[in-house]
Image (cartoon, rainbow, N blue to C red):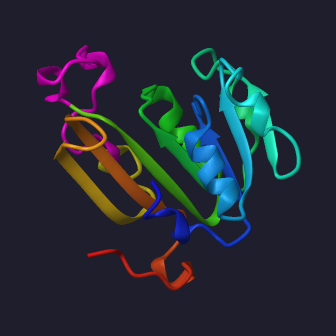
């Protein structure tokens, strides 16, 4: 997530979906973004609330998610998969907004949890899910950090690449 965050409009409003304890929320705040952090359990997020951070307790799996609005300059989702959210994520981006999505993929069952296929992306699934966006980067495969896993990640824009801030992908 960190390497793609500079694609988001400087000072923009970012939605951190399934924010958990707020690891990415804190990073985004430190980078100068306004952040709406959403999770069904906000105990770990309440310390971040105030100023540039809004915390919302929302069960993303019961249809409440898109009461969260739209016009986001960035949406970040990590280690969470609820396929019905894909269209709403893409639609909630402002023109030129960036989605950064990373979660576990098929093959991860070799490394432990999650191992249920319902919670693992199929090959190329994020490409299909965000086909209406301009893909900036897509990766799938094994990683060793922070722990061995099989993941899929995408960074994509709701607009042509010419609308993005100047950015060079790390080598």
Residue 99 position, x and y percent, is: 51, 54
Tell me: residue 74, above or below residue 89. Answer: below
Which residue lies at the image location 29% right of the left edge and 19% below the top edge?
Answer: 114
Q: Residue at left 21%, top 48%?
A: 140
Residue 33: quadrant of the picture: bottom right
Image check: 165 left or right of 33? left
* Main secondary structure of the magenta stretch: loop
Say which of 129 and 103 sits in front.
103
Provide the residue span drawn in magenta: 106-126
Instruction: Please provide percent x and percent y for residue 123.
Output: 18, 40
Residue 33 highlighted magenta (yes or no):
no
Which quadrant of the structure image shows residue 23? top right
Residue 146: x %, y % from top left: 31, 40
Q: Position of residue 84 (x, y in %)?
A: 49, 27
Magenta-span inclusion, residue 112? yes
- Residue sitting at 33 percent across and 21 percent down? 119
**Quadrant assignment for the N terminus:** bottom left
Decide: is 4 above or below 93: below
């Amino acid at each position: 997530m960190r390497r793609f965050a500079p694609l988001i409009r400087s000072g923009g409003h970012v939605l951190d979906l399934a924010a958990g304890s707020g690891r990415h929320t804190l990073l985004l705040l430190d980078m100068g973004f306004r952040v709406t952090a959403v999770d069904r359990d906000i105990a770990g997020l309440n310390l971040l609330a105030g100023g540039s951070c809004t915390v919302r307790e929302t069960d993303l799996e019961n249809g409440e998610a898109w009461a969260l609005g739209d016009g986001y300059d960035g949406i970040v989702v990590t280690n969470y998969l609820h396929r019905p959210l894909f269209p709403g994520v893409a639609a909630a981006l402002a023109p030129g907004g960036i989605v950064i999505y990373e979660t576990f993929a098929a093959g991860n069952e070799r490394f432990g949890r999650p191992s249920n296929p319902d919670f693992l992306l199929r090959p190329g699934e994020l490409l299909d899910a965000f086909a209406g966006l301009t893909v900036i980067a897509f990766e799938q495969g094994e990683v060793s950090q922070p722990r061995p896993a099989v993941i899929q990640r995408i960074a994509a824009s709701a607009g042509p690449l010419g609308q993005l801030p100047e950015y060079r992908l790390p080598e």
